[in-house]
Image (cartoon, rainbow, N blue to C red):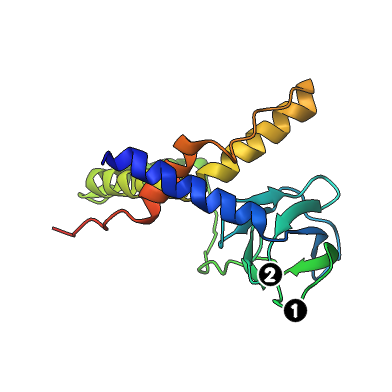
Amino acid sequence: MNKRFLIGVIAMLVVTLAWTQPTIRLAGVVVDQETLDPIFGTTIFNKSRVGGAVTDSAGFFLTEVMPGDTLEFRDVRYVTSTLVVPEILQATDYGIIQMMAPNTVMLEEVSIFSFPTEREFREAFLASRPPKNLQQRAEEAKQDLMKTIKESYEDDKYFYEMWSDRRLYELTGQIQPNHWLDPFRWSEFVERQFAKPEKDD
């Protein structure tokens, strides 16, 4: 049997089972725990299934979840936080206020001093020499950065597309197609979930 066809059938079965289970409409506001100001652009990632949301300018979000789902609130400015939807919930609509702690980065101490004259500064600057392996270190840093960006995009691909669709709707009023029942998207998702990890050389 064709592998892609089998994956597509499995994906459709998963979708069918998902539709038969009761969903919960979860509305909420994400705020800074220190200032209580709403946080714009926070991504709510549902780690239990394909889905999620992005907060608007008022920090508001709306998403559909199921009991037991794990939600992860991501924002580069704040510490990532996690929320597990309780299994005992029975109603169809709930609201929450999610607080996030600022992501504080401690930098190394830097000493700043000035040269007495412009001439001394020029002489000191021209006398300085960069490390011999500076070019190699810069190339390695560039490769590491590109790898990190690629991995980050692959992990959050669906949410980047969701955010893009949302912005397009806000700017043009055009509603993008719903990919929830797209078998090709589901087959891609299943292949990524069950792909064998690459062995390190």
Q: Which of 176 and 82 is in front in this view?
A: 176
Q: Circle 2 sits on which residue?
A: 67
Could you tell me the amino acid type at mark 1? Ile
Where does the N terminus fall, quadrant-wise? top left
Between disc 2 and disc 1, whose residue precedes?
A: 2
Q: Residue 107, located in which quarter of the rendered image? A: bottom right
Separation of marks 2 and 1 at Cα, in angstroms: 7 Å
User: Can residue 163 be seen at all in this image of the molecule?
Assistant: yes
x%, y% of residue 67? 68, 69
Is disc 2 in contact with disc 1, using a CB cutoff of under 8 Å? yes
- Residue 156: x percent and y percent? 52, 48
Residue situated in front as seen by the camera: 36 or 141: 36
Q: Residues within 10 Å of mark 2 (few under 14, many from 20)?
A: some
Q: Split into 4 quadrants, where in the image is the C terminus?
A: bottom left
171 horizontally vs 10: left or right: right
Disc on res. 88: 1
Q: What element carries label 1?
A: loop
Evaluate whether residue 148 shows in this view: no
- Does residue 30 sit above or below 152 in this rendering? below
Amino acid carrying mark 2 in the image: Pro
Residue name at image x 78 percent, y 67 percent: 98
Most foreground residue, 116 or 182:
182
| Mark number, residue 51 | none
Name the spot of residue 64 as percent of width and height, x first. Answer: 72, 55
Examine the rendered structure and indicate whether residue 75 appears above or below residue 54: below
Q: Which residue lies furthest to the bottom in this view?
A: 88
Q: Residue at x 85, y 64 (%)?
A: 95
* Residue in the image at 27% along x and 50% along y: 137
